[in-house]
């Protein structure tokens, strides 16, 4: 079953503003469709609607699903995203993804 995966981010003032993402098929370890760059708000909406969103890293020529992405509310009312490693996952974060 394909999941939404983020493999690149765009930052402004320490906040993610855009991501490169797409539908990733873990069983084939490949993208189900080509990736696109979208505003972070689309990721927030997908998560709010129950979609699983994960980070995706390339290490040693292989791709690995990283931590799950969650919604991060800021004090000023803006909403962003974050990724936190859980037990058994590679310890990578959004800061470790390439800039797009």
Image (tube, grey):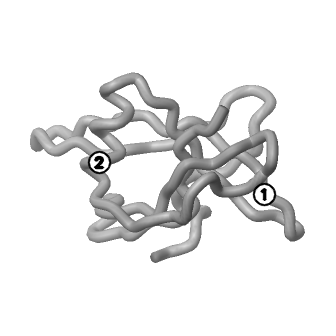
Query: Mark 1 sits on what residue?
Result: 63
Query: Residue at 25% across / 36% down in the picture?
Result: 73
Q: Quadrant of residue 57?
A: bottom right
Question: Is mark 2 in CB contact (under 8 Å) with mark 1?
Answer: no
- Across and down, in percent, residue 5 comes to 56, 49
Label drawn at residue 99: none
Where is the N terminus found, in terms of image quarters? top right
Count of numbered circles on the image:
2
Q: Quadrant of residue 50?
A: top left
Query: Residue at 53% across / 43% down in the picture?
Result: 4
**For this view, does 31 lie left or right of residue 41?**
right
Of residues 71 and 34, the one drawn nearer to the viewer in this rendering? 34
- Across and down, in percent, residue 33 comes to 56, 58
Of residues 37 and 40, the one drawn nearer to the viewer in this rendering? 37
Image height of 3 relative to 49, above or below: below
Query: Residue at 25% across / 48% down in the picture?
Result: 41
Structural crowding at the residue carrying mark 1, measured as other residues with C-alpha within 10 Å and reported as few (<14), some (14–19) or many (≥20): some
**For this view, does 100 lie left or right of residue 18?**
right
Q: Residue furthest right?
A: 60
Label drawn at residue 42: 2
Query: Residue at 49% across / 75% down in the picture?
Result: 99
Q: Give whichever of discs 2 and 1 has the lower sequence position.
A: 2
Label 1: which secondary element:
strand
Structural crowding at the residue carrying mark 2, measured as other residues with C-alpha within 10 Å and reported as few (<14), some (14–19) or many (≥20): few
Label 2: which secondary element:
helix
Q: Residue furthest left?
A: 76
Q: Separation of disc 2 and disc 1 at Cα?
A: 23 Å
Of residues 20 and 79, the one drawn nearer to the viewer in this rendering? 20
Of residues 66 and 35, the one drawn nearer to the viewer in this rendering? 35
Q: Residue furthest bottom?
A: 100
- Across and down, in percent, residue 2 comes to 62, 38
């Amino acid at each position: 079953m394909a999941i939404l995966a983020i493999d690149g981010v765009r930052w402004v003032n320490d906040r993610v503003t855009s991501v490169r993402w797409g539908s990733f098929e873990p069983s084939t370890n490949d993208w189900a469709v080509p990736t696109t760059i979208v505003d972070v708000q689309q990721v927030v909406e997908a998560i709010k609607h129950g979609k699983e969103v994960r980070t995706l890293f390339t290490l040693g020529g292989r791709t690995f699903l990283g931590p799950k992405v969650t919604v991060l509310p800021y004090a000023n009312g803006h909403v962003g995203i974050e990724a936190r490693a859980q037990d058994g996952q590679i310890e990578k974060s959004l800061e470790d993804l390439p800039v797009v």
